[in-house]
Image (tube, rainbow, N blue to C red):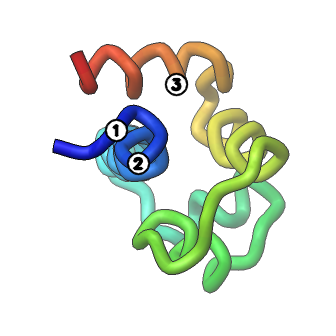
């Protein structure tokens, strides 16, 4: 088991992926709603690129979720 610092990025990605799947959205739909490029969204959500705070906010808001709520859901999964 890794540290909080090691696990948090993965758990955030998983939470974003889960929220996207609940909406039954493609990467393209999330990209459009977030104002990001589809390829960038794919890289963020597959772990090929780290998600910074502004990107996390854009993705969360694109999904219609407050970024703090998304973070809370993600961190609750770690416990």
Picture coordinates of residue 60, whole percent (x, y): 63, 37
In the structure shown, which secondary structural element does the residue marked by tag 3 occupy? Answer: helix
What residue is disc 2 on?
6
Q: In the rendered image, which residue does mark 1 sit on? A: 3
Left or right of 76, for residue 48:
right
Q: Distance between the residues labelled 1 and 3?
A: 20 Å
Rendering quarter of residue 11: top left
Distance between the Cα atoms at labels 3 and 2? Answer: 18 Å
Cβ atoms under marks 1 and 2 closer than 8 Å: yes
Q: Which of 24 and 41 is in front in this view?
A: 41
* Contact, mark 1 vs mark 3 (Cβ under 8 Å): no
Are there few (<14), some (14-19), or many (20+) residues within 10 Å of tag 3? many
41 up-or-down from 55: above or below: below
Residue depicted at 48% across the width and 14% down the height: 72
* Percent position of residue 23, x then y: 39, 42
Kind of element beneath mark 1: loop
Front of the two marks 3 and 2 = 2
Return the residue nearer the eye: 77 or 62.
77
CB under 8 Å between discs 3 and 2: no
Q: In which quarter of the image is the N terminus?
A: top left
Q: How many marks?
A: 3
Residue at the location (41% across, 72% down)? 46
Q: What is the CA distance from the residue labelled 1 to the residue labelled 2? A: 5 Å
Along the horizontal axis of the image, is 15 left or right of 39?
left
Q: Position of residue 63 (x, y in %)?
A: 58, 39
Residue at 58 percent of width and 63 percent of height: 29
Identify the residue under disc 3. 70
């Amino acid at each position: 088991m890794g540290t909080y610092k090691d696990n948090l990025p993965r758990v955030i990605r998983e939470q974003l992926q889960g929220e996207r799947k609940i909406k039954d959205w493609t990467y393209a739909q999330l990209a459009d709603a977030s104002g990001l490029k589809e390829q960038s969204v794919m890289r963020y959500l597959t772990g090929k690129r780290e998600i910074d705070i502004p990107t996390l906010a854009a993705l969360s808001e694109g999904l219609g979720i407050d970024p703090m709520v998304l973070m809370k859901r993600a961190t609750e999964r770690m416990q």
